[in-house]
Image (tube, helix red, strand yellow):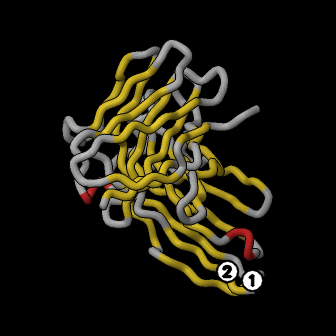
Amino acid sequence: SQELEQSPQSLIVQEGKNLTINCTSSKTLYGLYWYKQKYGEGLIFLMMLQKGGEEKSHEKITAKLDEKKQQSSLHITASQPSHAGIYLCGAAPFDNYGQNFVFGPGTRLSVLP
Amino acid sequence: KAGVTQTPRYLIKTRGQQVTLSCSPISGHRSVSWYQQTPGQGLQFLFEYFSETQRNKGNFPGRFSGRQFSNSRSEMNVSTLELGDSALYLCASSLAGAGNTIYFGEGSWLTVV
């Protein structure tokens, strides 16, 4: 079965600093999703990547999927306290059909003002 | 457009009891899935329903069950509750078909005492 690993496990940065979170899959990714979660709340959709080499940006967050489609990175530029939370990567099933996603363990981000 | 709505948000049950959680998907979404989130196991897929039929099932015991109604609303039931069932239960919905983003509700916090 597919497994996702995330690094780092947790991250503390000063406001204004850039940071990167990585997500590595044991198998080829057919759809890679990034979500953000505030503790005890639901997941907020950030971005979806499907094609090798694909890169997407939204506000100060950029996500990339490598050419081999086994690794993705999430980069935050000029971090703000509002970026704090748990970032989760999720993988769609092999045919990208259905909702039985596998999720990584998450990266807990703290941004110090 | 209303998001995914889950009820109740918080509940406390006693070991051996059963519980039913409800989920109303985003209007037009016919696929509904359920996930369990715990500190130890992370976010794990329970099952998915599409057009009132269970399409995918995760690796959970038979005490966990669900159903979907003709209006796409879904319920999940856990019978003979155990302490280890204490978790955040998240519901997600999406449009039918491949490559669609899944959108999560705020979750239902279940505590078993």
Q: Residue at x 72, y 34 (%)?
A: B2
Rendering coords of residue A82 (x, y %)? 74, 70
When asked about the image quadrant of residue B76, the answer is top left
Picture layout, residue B22 above or below residue B109: above
Q: Is residue A94 something one can see in this rendering?
A: no
Q: What is the count of numbered marks?
A: 2
Label 1, on which residue? A15
Relative vertical location of residue B106 with respect to residue A78 in this rendering, above or below: above
Q: Earlier in the sequence, mark 2 or mark 1?
A: 1
Badges 2 and 1, same chain: yes
**Image quadrant assignment for residue A110:** bottom right
Left or right, A78 with reference to B96: right
Q: Which three-letter amino acid code belongs to the residue tagged 2? A: Val
Residue closer to the observer: B40 or A75: B40
The kind of residue tagged 1 is Glu
Answer with left or right where residue A11 lies relative to residue B80.
right
The answer for which chain carries disc 1 is: A
Question: What residue sits 52% from the left and 24% below the top?
Answer: B73
**Rounded to the nearest whole Å, what is the CA distance between mark 2 and mark 1?**
6 Å
Q: Position of residue B106 (x, y in %)?
A: 58, 49
The chain holding disc 2 is A
Say which residue label 2 marks. Answer: A111
Q: Are marks 2 and 1 in contact (CB under 8 Å)?
A: yes
Residue A75: x, y in percent?
A: 65, 66
Seen at 77% across and 63% down, the residue is: A60
Q: Quadrant of the N terminus of chain A?
A: top left
Quadrant of the image containing the C terminus of chain A: bottom right
Q: Residue at x 34, y 48 (%)?
A: A27
Q: Residues within 10 Å of mark 2 (few under 14, many from 20)?
A: some
Helix, strand or loop for disc 2: strand
Q: Between residue B14 and residue A84, name the one nearer to us.
A: B14
**Residue placed most toward the observer, A96 or B106:** B106
